[in-house]
Image (cartoon, rainbow, N blue to C red):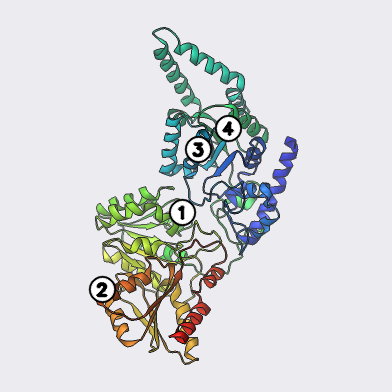
Amino acid sequence: MTVSELSQLADEIRPYITDVVSRTGGHLSSNLGVVELTIALHYVFNTPEDKIVWDVGHQCYTHKILTERREKFETLRQDGGISGFPSRKESPYDVFDTGHASNSISIAVGLAEARKKSHNTNKIIAVIGDGSLTGGMAFEALNHAGHLKSGVIVVLNDNEMSISKNIGALSSHLNKVMTGEFVSNIREEIKGRIKNLPGLGDKVYKVARHVEEAIKGLITPGMLFEALGFTYVGPVDGHNLNHLLDNLRNIKRLKGPVLIHVITKKGRGYNHAEDDPARFHGISTFEVTTGECKGTGACTYTDVFGDAIVELARNDEKIIAITAAMGLGTGLDRYSNLFPERFYDIGIAEQHGVTFAAAFALGGYRPFVAIYSTFLQRAYDQIILDVCLQNLPVVFAVDRSGIVGQDGPTHHGVFDITYFRHMPNIIVMSPKDENELRHMLYSAYLYEKPAVVRYPRGEGRGVVMDETFKEIPLGTWELLKDGKDLAIVACGNTVYPALSAALKLEGEGIRCCVVNCRFIKPMDREMLISLASEVPRILTVEENVLIGGFGSGVMEIFSDEGITLPVKRLGIPDIFLSHGSQSTLRKSIGIDEEGIKQFIRQWLKTA
């Protein structure tokens, strides 16, 4: 294709992505920003032999359309459709199943070393955003690549406006000249001649190198990358195909690690996404002409957290809010506007964020750390050693716990009960509804210990909200329904389905007791032992992996007490759940109302 035809292709892809995402939901603004960059990469490099690693994967839609999935793109993130992230099951063009930030350069360095040992010559390209570059893992990989003199190409997709002034004809022309074969050969020739000067070669070369780096540092933002051993190229206009193609062709010939700094605009080509890229980063279905979401407008658990922390902070100036590049997603946007001096967005650096919060608590403040369940996994060590070991009053507001839906296996928050439950000193809570969430946040604030409040993605149940906060007695469960045939002990998002199932079974003559196990740790040991003396069997229900989960905790107590009551567990089996609607996924593993009913019927039938 000619460059003009490539430009036409970009103009066709943008509205197609916008139209599909308006109907399926997904990551829009980041994908609209990399259309030309993606086209240029596939044009210059020979994929899939040459490998493109997409950091996070928020920007892979054009890549999917260009790699044999244009027709399937209509099924994006739907039940049985294609994933919203790179997926090795889908295509040989997808190098790695990504979904979390900052690991692309590590993957690229590993692939480059494997390539070298296998005597291959294919190119390895990592595409990473400026946001992902805030993660420490990215810098660890950059440092290692420079040390190895690894032949990787890192494409830094920078959509911040602060350095947009560096874009222009002169900058692009200089980059093209400096990466050209003629200039590159001259540089290598000069290096060789200087190093071979008798007695003075190395000293002269080091001085020349320092002078070159100092000059570069004055006119480009690349001195850091040069210090790490990379050849730095940029900034390059990420929406100018001529400039992209020229620079990528030149870079393809360079040896050693290279970083090309590309400036793009999030939401490019769709006005609503350009004006509000944060809202369109990850968005549900919307109306293309107006940009308005098609949701019901009902209050979400995220909204309830955002309102509750504002209310708490009005009464206590010691409350601090911390998040990791997810201020809007975690509901802290209002808090950040009202209390900017008490709000910290630490970037994609969850490990730092947790230890930062621990130090704040040590200094006499009350930090609330709001991070999605799937991302908080990255700070496992810091939670154990820097918070729990110190027994510091940090509150973790763990959004997106349980099944999240269309974002798929990299985003389901189905491991947090397991990874929190074995940590000493920590309290773990999960509300049955949005009103209980309010009271849990307040209670966690009062307990003066490490505390976790885990809650699901999506809308609340529409219950009446109490006007004032109430403290929930630590470690207590709530009996919702009596019954003598079986006890259903459920936590969090599974409590109401369990209650509905029990009420329906009542009409069939099956009397089930239902307990809201709002504390996962500490459990209500007294109530659990009492239940064991009143019912012949117990069913546990949770939206977490069964291994090491809530049900495991119930069985541990029975083991400790010598209780031999039959216990069955419903939850997520030892698999990675795919993407799809939350309701479909819950039904597939039997933790919705109908699944619970069928399980109980079958159990009692065979008992």
Q: How many residues crowd around disc 3 within 10 Å: few (fewer than 14), some, or many (20 or more)? A: few
Q: Looking at the rendering, which quadrant does residue 564 occupy? A: bottom left
Amino acid type at image mark 1: Met
Q: Quadrant of the C terminus?
A: bottom left
Residue 416, which numbered label? none
In the displayed structure, does residue 142 sit left or right of residue 283?
A: left
Residue 121, which numbered label? 4
The alpha-carbon separation of the residues under discs 1 and 4 comes to 39 Å
Q: Determine whether label 3 and label 1 are within 8 Å by CB.
A: no
Name the one closer to the observer, 564 or 467: 564
Point out residue 349 in the picture as x, y percentages from the top left corner. 41, 47
Labels 3, 1: front one: 3
The alpha-carbon separation of the residues under discs 2 and 3 comes to 50 Å
Callout 2: SS: helix
Name the one closer to the observer, 468 or 29: 29
The alpha-carbon separation of the residues under discs 2 and 4 comes to 60 Å
Relative to 29, does residue 447 appear above or below in the rendering?
A: below
User: Does label 3 or label 1 sit earlier along the sequence?
Assistant: 3
User: Does label 2 or label 4 sit earlier along the sequence?
Assistant: 4
User: Does label 2 or label 3 sit earlier along the sequence?
Assistant: 3
Callout 4: SS: loop
Amino acid type at image mark 3: Ala
Residue 114, which numbered label? 3
User: Does label 1 or label 4 sit earlier along the sequence?
Assistant: 4
Amino acid type at image mark 2: Asp
Relative to 404, does residue 480 appear above or below in the rendering?
A: below
Q: How many residues crowd around disc 1 within 10 Å: few (fewer than 14), some, or many (20 or more)? A: some
**Disc 1 target residue:** 326
**Disc 2 target residue:** 560
Q: Residue lying furthest top in this view?
A: 198
Point out residue 577 in the picture as x, y percentages from the top left corner. 51, 63
Q: Looking at the rendering, which quadrant does residue 485 occupy? A: bottom left
